[in-house]
Image (cartoon, rainbow, N blue to C red):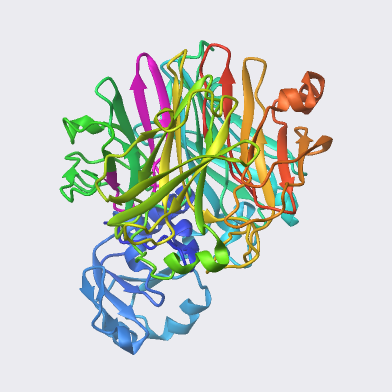
Amino acid sequence: MLDIRTFDQRQGGNVLYKALAHPLAVEAVTALYARLAPPVAVFDPDGIAAALFALNPGHPALEGVYVQDVREIGSPRVGMAARPLTALREAAAGSVLVASFDPRIAARIAPMLPPGAEMATLDAARLPDRLLTLPRRYLDRLNFATNHAFFRDAEGLSTRLVTANYWAGYGAGPVRLWLRLFDADGTPLATWEQPVPEGAGGIAIDSREVRRRFNLPPFTGQLFLHAVGAAGHDVVKYALDTFATGGNGASLSCTHDANAWPADRYAGVPAPRPDERVILWVQNSHAAPIPAGAIALDRIGAEHPVSLPQEIGPYASVALDVASLLPGLHWPAQIELRAGRHVVRPRYEVVHDGRTRIAHPNVERADLAPDPAIPALSNLLGRGFLLPFPVLPRRRFTTIVQPTPMATTQATLPLRLDVFDADGTPAAERFLGCLPRDHELALDLDDLLEPGKLAEGGHAELVYDFRDGGEADGWMHALIRAEDRHSGHRSETSFGAHIYNTPMTYKDEPQSYSGPPPGLSTRLFLKLGDATRRSFAHLIYAASAPWHPRSATTLLLHDSAGAVIAERPLEIACSGSAMVWPHLVFGEALLAQAGAEGYVLIRDTTCRLFGYHGLMEEAGGFSLDHMFGF
C-alpha cells in the first residue's frame, strides 16, 4: 500500500497529495534530492514525510526524522522512531530537509541546525507561479485542478477528450490547460499548454491531432491535465470517446473522468464471457514504481487475491488480461482490483468479435459501515436511495443490469428493480432478493418485460427492499450493459445510488452540484457528435418521493466560444425519461454553427435530472456512460 492520504469522503481531497504527485513537482524534488548532502535529517512538522518519500523515491540516506508535537515523539515516521525537534542540533547530519511548503518554518528552526548542515525546504518543489491559480496560497485546492485520462492513438483506435470551461461560471478569469502525455513505458512524449475559451466554451483534445502536432509514433498511455486559473471545481471533468478510426462501427465507447484520487480498491470489473477477453489497464499515476505483487485481482466475495508478479514503472501503462490471474472465471462473476493507491480510477477493455469497448470500475470504499437508519427513511424520503439507469429502445437494444458491491463491508444487497415507461408509468417490478456479496445475478430486462414494452425506451431504478432482511449503506452500485440486437455491439457503464428530488435531506443527500443539499437543480454537459456519430442523452427524472409532475428543463446549445446560440424547452414526467438527440432538437444548421467543440447544457432549476450519454453510428456502433455536471 502506497503510504499516502488522498481522498476522504468527509474532508474531500488532500491537496498536499496533488502537490507532491504533480509531474513537475516530481522533477523538482528529484533535483532537490541531488543537492542534499547525506545523511539527511528530516524535520516533519505536518506529517508529510512518508508521502513525500513514497511519491518521490530515490532520496539520500536519512539520519533521522524530527517532530514538533511532543505527542508524536517515538511514533513511526518513514521506518524510524520520531525524535524531538530539540534534539536536531545534535544530529550527525550533512543537511536538514524541512518537509513543509510553509516558508516561515525554515527561519524558526535555523538556530537549531547541526553545525555545518545546510537547510532545504519543499519551497524548492513548488510549481512555478505561472502554473498557479492562487500563488499566495500554494496549497489551495484550486492550484491543483488536475486529473488523468486514458489516452490512445494506436492499432486503429483513437481517443477524443471533451469538456467545457465550466470554471467560467464560477467567476474564473483566463484559464489554460497544462498537459503532459506519457507513453506505455511512462516516457513523456509531449508537454504543452492549451488555452481555453474565456467564456463557458467547449474544449476538445483529439489524440489524432496531438499525434500529428508532435510527430509521434502510435501510443497508448495516459494524459495528465492541469487547469490553471480554475474556480469552483478542483477536478478536471471530462468525457472520453474511444473510436475506430475507420468509422466502420467496429469500436466505439465513452468513459467518464478519472476521479483524480488514487484508491485502495476498485470494483465493478466484469469477468469475461467465454468468447471475450477483459483487459484491465493498470496505469501508474506516480513517479514511484509499483512493486511486484502490489497489484492484485480477486473475485468479489472470494477473498483470495492473486497478485501481479511484475513491477510497473513510473507513469507506465500495462494491459493486464484478467484471465492471466483469474483463469476460468467468467461472467456474471465480478472482479475486484486491489490497487494499493497506485492508480486513479482505471479502465477496462472488453474485446469481443473484432470489437472493443472500454468502461471504468468505481472506487470501492473502505470507510463505510451499514447504516441502520436507511430502512426507516421511507416515511419521509419515500423510496429513498435510487439508482436510475436507461432502458434504451427495446426494438433495437437489450439491457442487462448487474448489482455490484462497492464497499468492503457490503455483505448483502437487498434490492428491488422498478421499471418505468418514458411517461413515468410503472411498467414492471421485481424483487431481486437479499443478494450475497458474491452473487451472480445479471438480469436481462427481456426476461422481465413483455414483448413490445418500452419499445421506444424508458428507464429502471434499483431501490433497497428489506422484505428478506439485509443491510444498506447508501453506496448501491450497478453495471448496466446494452447490446444492439442487430450489430452485436455492446456498451456498458456503472454508477451509484442517490436520493432524488425530495425537500427533506439525509446526511449529504440529495446531493447538489454546488452548495449544501438538497440538490434540486440540474446542470449537465452533453457533447455534440458529427455527421457519422450522432450524440444523444437519455435523461431520467428520478424521484424518491412525489415531486413536480413535470420537469421544466431547458436545452441550451453553446458554440465553441461558449455563447448560447439556441435554446429549447423540454418537459419530462416525474419518474419518466426522455431521449435527446441534438441534431433533431436543434437541426443541422445550428449544430454546424456550434462547431466541433460546441455542446448542449441541460439546465433545470426545479428538479435534479440524471443522465446518460453517448454516440451512435449507422453501422451499429454506440457508446454509453453517465453524464457529468458542474
Q: Nearer the viewer, residue 67 or 283?
A: 283
Q: Name the image quarter holding residue 569.
A: top right
Can I make out residue 89 in this image? no
Q: Residue at x 35, y 62 (%)?
A: 51
Q: Nearer the viewer, residue 359 or 214?
A: 359
- Is 256 on the left or on the right of 27, as rendered? right
* Residue 542 belongs to magenta span: no
Q: Name the image quarter holding residue 35.
A: bottom left
Q: Position of residue 151 (x, y in %)?
A: 47, 31
Location of the N terminus by quadrant is bottom left
Tell me: residue 617, above or below residue 318: above
Q: Residue at x 52, y 55 (%)?
A: 498
- Is 590 on the left or on the right of 438, as rendered? right
Tell me: residue 402, above or below residue 501: above
Q: Nearer the viewer, residue 526 or 100?
A: 526
Q: Position of residue 510 (x, y in %)?
A: 58, 60
Q: Of all residues shown, which one is farthest toward the right?
A: 565
* Residue 337 belongs to magenta span: yes
Can I make out residue 367 in this image? yes
Tell me: residue 202, above or below residue 414: above
Q: Residue at x 65, y 60 (%)?
A: 514
Magenta span covers which residues?
336-362
